[in-house]
Amino acid sequence: MTGKQRALLAVEALKKEYPEAVCSLTYTDPIQLLIATRLSAQCTDARVNMITPALFARFPALDDFAAATEEEIQPYIHSCGLYKTKARDIRAMSRMLKEQYGGRVPDTIEELVRLPGVGRKTANLVVGDVYHKPAVVTDTHCIRICGRLGLSEGKDPLKVEKQLRAVLPMEESSDFCHRLVLHGRAVCTARSPKCGECCMDSFCQYAAEQKA
């Protein structure tokens, strides 16, 4: 079986198992998604979704974040960890968006990663969810599950992204990554994957190894 054949099987299996491929983060506009994704670093999406309503109520628009001090932002994001660094990045990225991009979130990975605190994971998420362009979000769930399936090797996010771009049907890639998050939480967990309950058991390399 080729990598592309295995990838297509995975796409179809997850599509059937999780028809609704939605982002786990709650947001109403591109700025909010950008900020919520920055907050999610080393923090659960559930925790981020708990704190963003108050954060976005206090700072409802880009101009509000750009005008705020780091100290004004910090109390609202304290519980998601690394709050000082995240507050600094949020303020800096907001100012850069206002001054260099006319308040508009860029639509390319290359431009997005220029923003303070924005890496390829965040950039791919924004490009895929906001602008509906081909994107591969290599978070921990994606790296773990695709490695087990045999679609990728290693744990370096950029290397995994490149490997997946070579085998995935790119029109499906963004939704595929959202479904991986759901599957990683429910079935293919880090410590004790439930292979017997998995919709990809029949073509997963890891599952085959466990049966051998």
Image (tube, grey):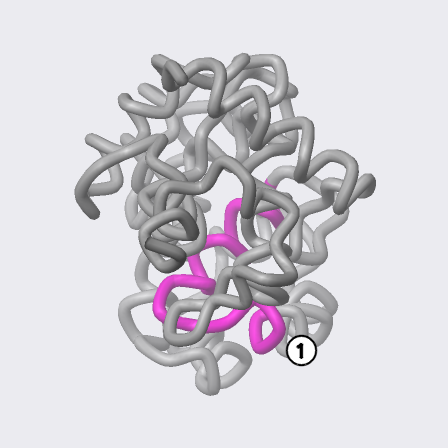
Side (left or right) of 17 relative to 87: right
Quadrant of the image for the C terminus?
A: bottom left
Q: For the point 36% across and 76% down, which residue is it?
A: 83
Image point 66% across, 69% down: which residue?
A: 49
Residue 119 visible in the shown view: yes
Is residue 41 a member of the stretch shown in magenta?
Answer: yes
Name the image quarter holding residue 192: bottom left
Can you see residue 107?
no
Pointer 1: what residue?
A: 50
Foreground residue among 51 and 159: 159
Residues drawn in magenta:
31-48
Q: Nearer the viewer, residue 192 or 202?
A: 202
* Residue plotted at (39% across, 49% down): 139
Q: Along the horizontal axis of the image, is 143 left or right of 137? A: left
Disc 1 marks which amino acid? Met
Mark 1, secondary structure of its residue: helix
Residue 82 position within the rendered picture, expressed as x and y whole percent measured from the top left:
31, 76
Q: Nearer the viewer, residue 78 or 195?
A: 195
Is residue 201 in the magenta section? no
Image: 47 above or below 130: below
Left or right position of 183 against 188:
right
